[in-house]
Image (cartoon, rainbow, N blue to C red):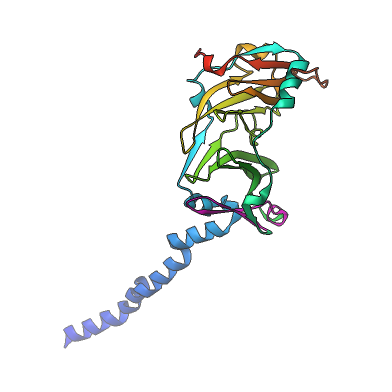
Amino acid sequence: MRKNHATVFFIILFAPLLLFARPSSGENETKTKETEPSVSEQESAEDENPQKCNRAWRKAISKQIDLGFFASYEKLPKITFAEISKAEFDRYKSVYRPKLDPQPSRITITETTFTIDTNLAKLTFYRENQDLLDRHHACWMVYKGYYPELKTHALVDASEAEGLNFGTYMLVDSDTNTAYSLASMEADGAVETPLVSPGNGYLAYYQNSPYKPGTFIGLIRITGDPKRFREYASFSSREYKDSDRFNSVEDLVWIDDDAFAVKAAHIEKFSETRPEPKYFKTKSLREVKAP
């Protein structure tokens, strides 16, 4: 009898503590679901939020290739220039016709998005929306046009954060559904619109620094069918021997498939005056030499 009384006393005394210390498995599952959304729920929320930089279209492309980083150009030939007259530059400019068609006839546009049809997928992008910018840091895409002979769309992947604007110029191949991103070298924004050579062998682009005198010119080689883009040569006023003649580009035009010309100037640090432009053309791009 004494043993039975002791057992009953123990159960009455400690049973509430055991119940308190061990909540049911159902309560644990409820708390986990409330605090840790599933992977699919997280991805769905990111796809619907423009602040996530249009993740949905990134899933639809076949491949994304980054081009134009310093580490790549560092190993490649450098572009050199010879000075020419304004009249010669103007003659080249009057003949050259940019190949980018800026008309949006090849895309479907809504109030908030635009859609590109490639041979393999439909790519939908968020357009710039002031309501989104007012509510939070936003990302959006700007449609720049289409290179018919390259079968390639041109866009700018833009964003704003803390009052600063950022951007990356992108090329989307409509045959392969591949997206090529051109890295910015002198600023946070996108490079100037790339220009295609007359024979479709090269693509040239430039970017001036908004912070201090400096300019960068990148040259992309176009080969193959379907088209393939790769770094070929470059110029930087911060590093190469022509920097004493110009460090800002105002215009660029192609002469033929092996040479282009630039309208440029040499800007002095802290100067408020705009110097008179100078004009230069490249030597044959087939003759560029590694440093």
Determine which quarter of the picture holds residue 86. Answer: top right
Q: Which of 125 and 82 is in front in this view?
A: 82
Is 1 left or right of 260, judged from the image as shown? Answer: left
- Which quadrant of the rendered structure holds the N terminus? bottom left
Residue 118, image x, y percentages: 52, 50
Q: Residue at x 59, y 24 (%)?
A: 257
When the figure is inspected, residue 248 is found, relative to residue 85, above or below; the finding is below
Say whether residue 125 is magenta. Answer: yes
Residue 83 placement, left or right of 56: right
Q: Nearer the viewer, residue 133 or 206?
A: 206
The residue that appears at 66% across and 51% down in the rendered structure is: 105
In the image, the segment drawn in magenta is 112-133
Return the x and y of residue 129 as percentages of the image width and height. Answer: 69, 54
In the image, residue 116 lies in the stretch drawn in magenta: yes
Q: Is 72 situated above or below 111?
A: above
Q: Is residue 121 visible?
A: yes
Residue 176, horizontal then vertical, whole percent: 47, 44
Which residue occupies the extreme right position in the image?
Answer: 273
Q: Where is residue 236 in the image (x, y as percent from the top left)?
A: 61, 20
Residue 134, above or below 163: below
- Along the line of sight, which residue is nearer the eye, 49 or 152? 152
The answer to whether residue 138 shows anywhere in this view is no
Using residue 39 as the reference point, say whether residue 250 is left or right of it.
right
Q: In which quarter of the image is residue 235?
A: top right
Q: Which residue lies furthest to the bottom in this view?
A: 1
Number of callouts: 0
Q: In this view, does 21 lie above or below 88?
A: below
